[in-house]
Image (cartoon, rainbow, N blue to C red):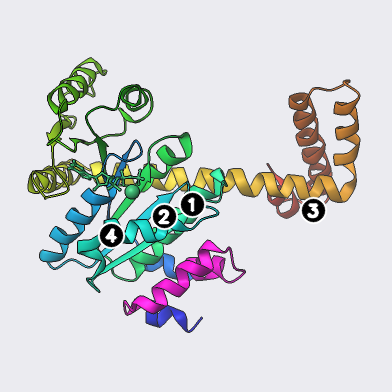
């Protein structure tokens, strides 16, 4: 764990090494993150999400450069659900983040999700913590907004920028269905292309139809950019900062922090509780019994899971009755 002081000093090789440990679920990763946790909570996280190919990486690159110009150490996390085998996207992101990639003040890392949807959020959360502890005051988090897992990841962002582009067709519906509610700033990129006005109008209409978020709630706007040459990016930066200003008022930041902690805590409870229950069921043979009843059709899988839970509670309930306090509490699901 001599990694820790070097990471806290902001050394990039230490940060890279730590991220690899987390990504590979190395046995040391858990303790590493736990020890660094008290040093986190300083960074601002901007989420950049939207359909494939709309220009998220190009925009991320432009934003990274601007924050660097303001003297902020920047971290970029690109969550890539499509690169489990090729690894090609890692290179792709570097290539598309050409401006920022040459700057040692910008630390870029792609995370392949390897199809593990639940693990995506945890790995991303941990990588953000590592960058935060390493003094990256501004973290840009790029995900392709296609599924629930990617939307969940946006719980780590203080400000979420939803990117669209002209000519999306049905994908604008996906934005409507999934990411409309999470966007704080909407960007129609590729404004140099035909149809940008229509896309802006569509998004504005969707925002108008969305339920009112309340009197002094943040009102998202739709901006346009040509990320490829930087047009309109300053306006995105201003809007993101305006959103921060809003978040810092009236105790909203504290509300955000609580919500974010609850998201992570609930996720951990879900995975830990499930893991413990499964381990116990396998060890005691209850698993095989219930499985066979599901096979025989005398139990459906949902009833089977409920039965497992009941048996688990009873097993630990009995122990708790003998020694109150410890076993019962530990075994509670
Ligand atoms: N015409 C035009 N093309 C752009 C613009 N911004 C990005 N592109 C191009 O669009 C393509 C996709 O850009 P990316 O930044 O990789 O898009 P992305 O949303 O990150 O893509 P994924 O991560 O694969 O979902 C690239 O060829 C870019 O050069 C723009 O403002 N105008
Ligand atoms: Mg990208």
Disc 2 marks which residue? 89
Numbered tag placed on residue 83 in the rendering: 1
Give the spatial CA distance, label 1 vs label 2.
6 Å
Return the residue at label 3. 323
Specify which label sits upstream in the sequence, 1 or 2. 1
Q: Start and end of the magenta stretch? A: 8-34
Q: Position of residue 30 (x, y in %)?
A: 55, 65
Q: Which residue is mark 4?
A: 43
First-in-chain label (4 vs 3): 4
Q: Earlier in the sequence, mark 4 or mark 2?
A: 4
Which type of secondary structure does the marked residue at label 3 adopt?
loop
In this rendering, the answer to whether 68 lies above or below 205 is below
Residue 282 falls inside the magenta stretch: no
Viewer-proximal residue among 265 and 151: 151
| Residue at the extreme front | 194
Label 4's element?
loop
Real-space Cα separation, disc 3 to disc 2, in angstroms: 54 Å
From the viewer's perspective, is the residue at label 4 or at label 2 nearer? Answer: 2
Above or below, 94 against 201 in this view is below
Contact (Cβ within 8 Å) of mark 3 with mark 2: no
* Residue name at image x 22 percent, y 19 percent: 212
Does the beta carbon at disc 2 come under 8 Å from ligand 1? yes
Q: Earlier in the sequence, mark 3 or mark 1?
A: 1
Q: Are marks 1 and 2 in contact (CB under 8 Å)?
A: yes
Residue drawn 30% across the image and 62% down it: 75
Residue 48, image quadrant: top left
């Amino acid at each position: 764990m001599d990694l820790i002081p070097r990471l806290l000093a902001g050394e990039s090789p230490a940060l890279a090494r730590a991220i690899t440990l987390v990504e590979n679920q190395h046995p040391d990763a858990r303790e590493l993150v736990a020890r660094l946790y008290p040093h986190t909570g300083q960074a601002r996280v901007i989420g950049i999400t939207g359909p494939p190919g709309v220009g998220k990486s190009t925009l991320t690159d432009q934003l990274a450069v601007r924050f660097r110009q303001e003297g902020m150490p920047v971290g970029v996390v690109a969550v890539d659900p499509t690169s489990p085998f090729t690894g090609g996207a890692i290179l792709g992101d570097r290539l598309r983040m050409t401006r920022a990639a040459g700057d040692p003040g910008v630390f870029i890392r792609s995370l392949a999700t390897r199809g593990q949807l639940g693990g995506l959020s945890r790995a991303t959360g941990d990588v953000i913590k590592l960058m935060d502890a390493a003094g990256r005051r501004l973290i840009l988090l790029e995900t392709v907004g296609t599924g629930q897992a990617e939307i969940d990841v946006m719980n780590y962002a203080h400000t979420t920028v939803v990117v669209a582009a002209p000519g999306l067709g049905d994908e604008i519906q996906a934005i409507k269905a999934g990411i409309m509610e999470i966007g704080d700033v909407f960007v129609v990129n590729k404004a140099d292309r035909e149809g940008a006005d229509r896309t802006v109008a569509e998004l504005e209409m969707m925002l108008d139809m969305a339920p009112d978020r309340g009197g002094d709630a943040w009102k998202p706007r739709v901006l346009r950019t040509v990320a490829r040459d930087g047009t309109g990016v300053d306006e995105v930066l201003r809007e993101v900062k305006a959103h921060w200003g809003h978040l810092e008022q009236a105790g909203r930041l504290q509300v955000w922090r609580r919500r974010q902690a609850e998201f992570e805590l609930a996720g951990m409870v879900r995975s830990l509780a499930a893991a413990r229950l499964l381990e116990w069921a396998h060890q005691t043979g209850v698993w095989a019994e219930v499985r066979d009843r599901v096979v025989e059709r005398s139990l459906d899988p949902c009833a089977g899971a409920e039965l497992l839970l009941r048996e688990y509670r009873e097993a630990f309930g009995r122990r708790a009755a003998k020694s109150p306090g410890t076993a019962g509490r530990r075994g509670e699901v």
